[in-house]
Amino acid sequence: MLRIENLTKIYPNGTRALHDVSFEVQDGEFLVVIGLSGSGKSTLLRCINRLIEPTSGKIFWDDIDITAASPAELRHIRRHIGMVFQQFNLVKRSSVMTNVLSGRLGYANPWLSLLGIWPAADKEMALKALERVGIADKAQSRADALSGGQQQRVGIARALMQDPKIILADEPVASLDPVLSHSILQYLEQLNKDGLTVICSLHFLDLVHRYATRVIALKDGVKVFEGLPKEIDRAKFKEIYGEEAQEVRAASFEAEA
């Protein structure tokens, strides 16, 4: 179980990205974090694995205080927290296989990995990860030769190389069209069904209703909603996104009615 207690993040320029945010994530959940751009979604996800250092508050994972972990302890914790990024974060001129193997860096001999020398077991694991996301045939292709949807699948395969228990997906479909968005979220959904906990930030309500088992909403860094997707009615949507968004997205509710 992941437990967030009174998490606050204030950036050096004075921006308060998160304010006193608390919630729990049970093992096996597909938790979706929603909110406008700038609401604190990315900051929240990156605080969980301390890519961003919280200003105050606590993050516990199975009663281990992540916020108090030493650098050595944090490296061990991060082995089991996979990250999928909005902009893929691939080394574009390297092969798909090399990008996927980089997910194993937390386990590998740093000198050998720097030379591109990987154990046979890691290479086999990388191929299996690519098979799980349907692009094993692209293993030797350059990453920049792939479509956006394929590159995101490489990102998921790379995260799987960590043998994660949790996957953090930071706006994983923001740069993809609707068809590809469903394709990527279906891969994450299957991983969730296979036992992984998924914490994913999303914008679109139809995707939230389709994939989330539970929802957290942020507005100006404050948690304004926690509950089931079906509990986000017109009034709650307006509270989270504001008057203008309510008018633009009203059709979403009518289409689902």
Image: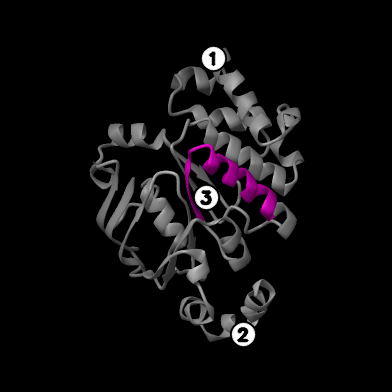
**Earlier-in-chain disc, 3 versus 2:** 3
- Quadrant for the C terminus in the image: bottom right
Q: Which mark is residue 89?
A: none
Callout 3 secondary element: strand
Query: Which amino acid lies under the numbered mark 2 shown in the image of this protein?
Result: Glu
Q: Which residues are magenta?
A: 181-200
The answer to the question of whether label 1 and label 2 lie on touching residues, with beta carbons closer than 8 A, is no
Query: Which amino acid lies under the numbered mark 1 shown in the image of this protein?
Result: Pro
Q: CA distance from mark 1 to mark 2?
A: 55 Å
Residue 101 is left or right of residue 138, and the answer is left
Q: CA distance from mark 1 to mark 3?
A: 28 Å
> Observer-nearest residue: 54 or 205?
205
Callout 2 secondary element: helix
> Observer-nearest residue: 225 or 104?
225
- Sort mark 2 into few (<14), some (14-19) or many (20+) by Cα contacts within 10 Å: few
**Earlier-in-chain disc, 1 versus 2:** 1
Answer above or below: position of 79 versus 215: above
| Dominant secondary structure, magenta | helix
Q: Residue at x 46, y 19 (%)?
A: 111
Q: Which residue is mark 1?
A: 119
Q: Which residue is mark 2?
A: 247
- Quadrant for the N terminus in the image: top left
Q: Which residue is mark 3?
A: 169
Answer above or below: position of 184 versus 118: below
Callout 1 secondary element: loop
Q: Is residue 90 visible?
A: no
> Observer-nearest residue: 210 or 166?
210
Q: Mark 1 or mark 2: which is in front?
A: 2
